[in-house]
Amino acid sequence: MGNQLVDGWNKFWNAVPNSAGVSTLLAIAGGAIMAWFLFSWFWKKTRGGGGGGNAMQGFPWWPMGVGLLLTAPAFLIPTVLRVIQAIIGLVDTILKTVTQTLS
């Protein structure tokens, strides 16, 4: 199948002007998001809020994921796209094998 997803992302990301500091701005924003939500989660945990018996209950998973994506768009997004492309390739191979076997 190839790497169409990753190649498309790389073309897009290479078109973004690096001299404008876009990646630096995204990294700062992502780090700030993660720091803010971690701090607020720890604050709630120390004040008796943020969950009962489970230590990770109420953990800000979504803000952490968004912050992670913003801090590493040149690495994390191509890695996720490679995994998705591998899954698509595996499903394609399975479907081709099944249709060839049934026909």
Image: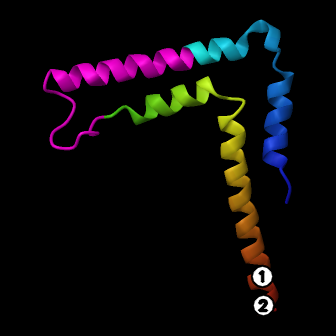
Amino acid carrying mark 1 in the image? Thr
Residue beneath label 2, please?
101
Left or right placement of residue 84 versus residue 35 in this view: right
Q: Residues within 10 Å of mark 1 (few under 14, many from 20)?
A: few
Asked if 37 appears above or below 69 in the picture, the reply is above
Q: Secondary structure at mark 1?
A: helix
Image x and y of residue 89, in percent = 76, 63
Dot label at residue 97: 1
Residue at the image position 59 percent from the left and 30 percent from the top: 69
Left or right placement of residue 48 versus residue 11 in this view: left
Left or right placement of residue 84 versus residue 62 in this view: right
Numbered-mark total: 2
Chain part drawn in magenta: 29-58
Residue at the image position 63 percent from the left and 17 percent from the top: 26
Amino acid carrying mark 2 in the image? Thr
| Quarter location, residue 8 | top right
Image quadrant containing the C terminus: bottom right
Image x and y of residue 15, in percent = 86, 23
Image x and y of residue 42, in percent = 27, 23
Q: Nearer the viewer, residue 61 or 98?
A: 61
Q: Are marks 2 and 1 in contact (CB under 8 Å)?
A: yes
Residue at the image position 74 percent from the left and 84 percent from the top: 98
Q: Say whether residue 51 is magenta.
A: yes
| Quarter location, residue 57 | top left
Q: Secondary structure at mark 2?
A: helix
By secondary structure, the bulk of the magenta-drawn segment is best described as helix
Q: Say whether residue 78 is magenta.
A: no
Image quadrant containing the N terminus: bottom right
